[in-house]
Amino acid sequence: MKPASLHTALQRWLFRVSGPEAAPITLGQRRIFVLPTRFGLALGATLAVMLLASINYSLSLGYALTFLLGGVAWMSIHHAFRNVVDLSIAPGRVEPVFSGTPARFGIVLGNPGTRPRTGLQLRPTHSPPTTATESFDLPAAGQTRQHVAIATTGRGWLQLPRLTLETYYPLGLIRAWSLIQPDMRGLVYPAPDAHAPALPYGMDEQPGDGAHGRGHDDFAGLRHHQPADSPRHVAWKAVARGGTWRTKTFDGGGRSTIWLDWQTLPSTLDTEARLSRLTRWIIEADQEGLEYGLRIPGTTLGPARGAPHRHACFTALALFGHPQ
């Protein structure tokens, strides 16, 4: 057996997590691991020195203090274990994001017991434990929803990686933890092209009246700026005067339906660049209230507008060339 395969098999046997798990996940006794922290090891070494000194000098109070502190440390093992055991984990919601933006996976944790759970932490296993990890509490016989941010580097489906649920309760001397991997995934859209040209008016567009949406003819006003807005529509004069960021909107009787076609893009663009440009055009067409259609190899989505159509177009781009 290869070393990599042996390491994987050892992890599966030791941590009892071989891949995405069906919900709900219950943390039984065999899934909880307990080890001393650096402070716990330091206390153990200190207690050993105190015991040797008490034996050497026959210090009755030394014995009492040593065994008292040792008993407290021993009880903290029990409390740390009880703080994690029998918890239940289920997948929550994860909203689609653009590539480069962290995906936030919702995790629902349940406490079936009659005592609250204190000082829990949830993080991706591959990230190092830090004191900056935000802790949370679970009420008795209650639930809480936590979010785990996972970095995105490409489009398509993103599987939730293995997570670590841990606690240092009550004294920080003991770390009790368990590894989990709820079966959930999130959709990652292509990153919008930051330098895309203007929308391709003149490509199979249809004339419409001003009631159908916002065109490019007449200035209609300003609205609050959104991160996905095109830089061409930012009210730069107002920004230069120190005002808040605003985006220009337009009304007009011009054209209100366009096609965003893969075949009309420059041949010098590779696949990912084409997908990024189409993503940017979908954002701009949606912001301007246009009816837009999408043509990519193997998929044609007719002209429409609104959130469902936008999501369908983004999904087609995200999964282009990928298995469903």
Image: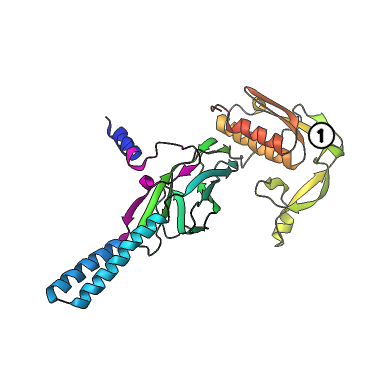
Residue nearest the viewer, comparing 159 with 58: 58
The verdict on residue 299 being magenta is no
Residue 19 left/right relative to 314:
left
Question: What's the residue at 55%, 52% (across, down)?
Answer: 143
Q: Amino acid at mark 1?
A: Arg
Q: Secondary structure at mark 1?
A: strand
Q: Is residue 41 above or below residue 258?
A: below
At which x and y percent is residue 46?
24, 68
Per the image, the residue denoted by label 1 is 255
Residue 153: x and y in percent read: 50, 40
Instruction: Say which of 76 and 175 sits in front.
Output: 76
Q: Residues within 10 Å of mark 1 (few under 14, many from 20)?
A: many
Q: Is residue 169 visible?
A: yes
Q: Nearer the viewer, residue 75 or 322?
A: 75
Left of 26 or right of it: where is 108? right
Q: Which residues are magenta?
A: 13-39
Q: Quadrant of residue 92?
A: top right
Among all residues in the image, which is located at the extreme top? 298
